[in-house]
Image (spheres, helix red, strand yellow):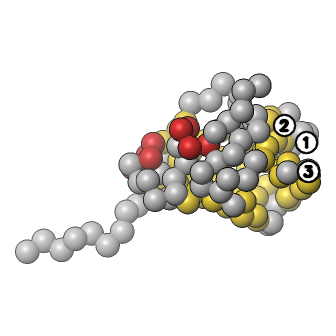
Amino acid sequence: MKEEKKYTLQTSPFIVPTDDGKVIKEHFGLASDGNSQVSIAHMIAPPGWSEPFQTPEFDEYTFIIKGKKQFIIGDETLVLEAGQSIKVNKHTRLQYSNPFTEPCEYIAICLPAFSIDSVHRENT
């Protein structure tokens, strides 16, 4: 009887196509392995990058590896730096950006997994 594998090693993450210079490498999630429970992505946001406001249907955890990332949550603006992390609860309106001069490298974890249909980005 063959024993079931006890782990999944990700060596070729799904590279999400973007047109804003942001690098998104999804290691686990809907696009990479069909996982709808969680998504884990390694990202690099270039200087001057920003996304429209959004109100996701998932909790999102962000851990900053290098650089800084700006979060506008409600009427509050936060800037996270390398070594800091944040959890933003689902159904919270927010905007992510990097208005700084250096790229921002970070890990994002979404529970349940990120999907374009559940992020609810606003029209710009």
Q: Marks 1 and 3, how far apart in space?
A: 20 Å
- Residue 62, position in %: x, y? 70, 59
Amino acid type at circle 1 is Phe
> Would you identify the image quadrant in which residue 25 lies?
top right
Where residue 31 sits, quadrant-wise, is top left
Q: Nearer the viewer, residue 5 or 79?
A: 79
The quarter in which the C terminus is drawn is: top right
Write the residue at 79% across / 36% down. Answer: 50
Q: Could you tell me residue 43's position as x and y percent?
A: 66, 47
The disc label shown at residue 75, or none: 3
In this orientation, which residue lies closer to the viewer: 12 or 75? 75
Helix, strand or loop status at disc 1: loop
Of labels 1 and 3, earlier in sequence is 3
Q: CA distance from mark 2 to mark 3?
A: 23 Å
**Mark 2 falls on what kind of element?**
loop
The residue pinned by badge 1 equals 100
Q: Is residue 49 above or below residue 105?
A: above
**x and y percent of residue 42 in the render?**
62, 51
Point out which mark residue 88 bears: none
Q: Secondary structure at mark 3?
A: loop
| Amino acid type, label 2 | Pro
Q: Residue at x 13, y 71 (%)?
A: 2
Image marks 1 and 2: residues in contact by CB distance under 8 Å: yes
Position of 114 relative to 5 (above/below): above
Q: Residues within 10 Å of mark 2 (few under 14, many from 20)?
A: some
The reply, left or right, for residue 101 in relation to residue 16 is right
Whether residue 99 can be seen here:
yes
Asked if labels 3 and 2 touch by Cβ distance under 8 angstroms, the answer is: no
Q: Which residue is mark 2?
A: 47
